[in-house]
Amino acid sequence: MKAHTTTSPVKPPELRDFYEDPAVPVASGAPRSRRQARMLADALGPATAGRTRTILDIGCGDGTAAATAAPFLTGHRIVGIDWSQDALRRARTRIPYAVRGELTDGGLPFATGSADAVLFSEVIEHLVDPDAALDEIRRVLRPGGHLMLSTPNLAAWYNRALLLAGVQPVFSEVSLRGIHGRPGREVVGHLRLYTARALREFVAASGFEVVRLAGAPFHGVPRPLRPLDRLACARPALASILLLHARRT
């Protein structure tokens, strides 16, 4: 008589495991970072004696975006925050302050109303619960504090053409294991995508006043098409990347 043996099923990888993988891209393009930093610098104004403003870069990744923004924000303190220990190790080689924190499971390690501004760059599209994320960001911002959010545009000019041709839009993903039905070679874990209108309405409904919506180019656009991508930035609804400036009401 054969003995029956039982084997435990292999646990499927979790989303957290995906983002802890060093092979997953954690940096985005410098043009977007520079445009966003200029918008924030204009909103904050120059640093003054005795008034160093605290800027939280939530989802800082490897610190590249914060390091790119720093020259535009001289005199202000930028603190990088990420849940990935691998990303934080790399971020600490580029920026002075980088700490572990999450938008769920206990919240960010900062007091209510302690931040003057939040950079939230290329993060919201990765979240299961973006509503809770904006609630937590609103908590740590002082009244009138600034939110600088960027995210890929579902209705980018080329995505409109791709959809008409029956092709999966750029930035959208159907799997964490591979690319299916769309251009591109990198799996980046996008769960949600926004149009300009949807982003405005969502942020406003979360207790913020939308100040400005701008566009930025995408570094992954093929070189021959980059002039068109830069031109599209003049109309944010068509741009590759949406840059939104809002204030806590």
Image (cartoon, rainbow, N blue to C red):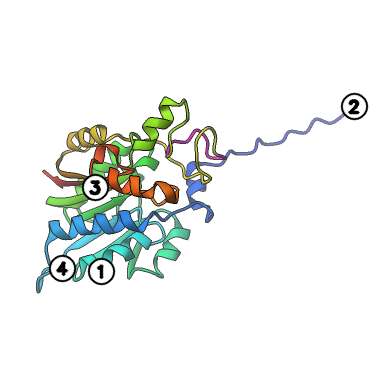
Label 2 – label 1 distance at C-alpha: 75 Å
As helix, strand or loop, the secondary structure at mark 4 comes to loop
Label 2 – label 3 distance at C-alpha: 62 Å
Left or right side of 152 for 166: right
Q: Residue at x 44, y 59 (%)?
A: 87
The residue identified by callout 2 is 1
Q: Looking at the image, do the residues carrying marks 2 and 4 touch, with CB atoms under 8 Å apart?
A: no
Residue 219 seen in this snapshot: yes
For the stretch drawn in magenta, the main secondary structure is loop
Q: Sequence order check: which comes first, mark 3 or mark 1?
A: 1
In this view, the mark in front (2 or 4)? 4
List x then y, in percent, for residue 176: 53, 39
Label 2 – label 4 distance at C-alpha: 77 Å
Q: Residues within 10 Å of mark 2 (few under 14, many from 20)?
A: few
Q: Residue at x 37, y 62 (%)?
A: 64
Label 4 – label 3 distance at C-alpha: 20 Å
In this view, the mark in front (3 or 1)? 1
As helix, strand or loop, the secondary structure at mark 2 comes to loop
> Which amino acid is tagged 1?
Pro
Label tally = 4
Q: Which residues are magenta?
A: 171-178
Q: Sequence order check: which comes first, mark 2 or mark 4?
A: 2
Q: Sequence order check: which comes first, mark 1 or mark 4?
A: 4
Q: Residue at x 29, y 50 (%)?
A: 120
Quadrant position of the C terminus in the picture: top left
The residue identified by callout 4 is 52
List x then y, in percent, for residue 193: 36, 36
The residue identified by callout 3 is 137
- Check the image and report above or below for 236 versus 41: above
Q: Which mark is residue 71?
A: 1
Residue in the foreground of this view, choosing between 225 and 132: 225
Q: Residues within 10 Å of mark 1 (few under 14, many from 20)?
A: some
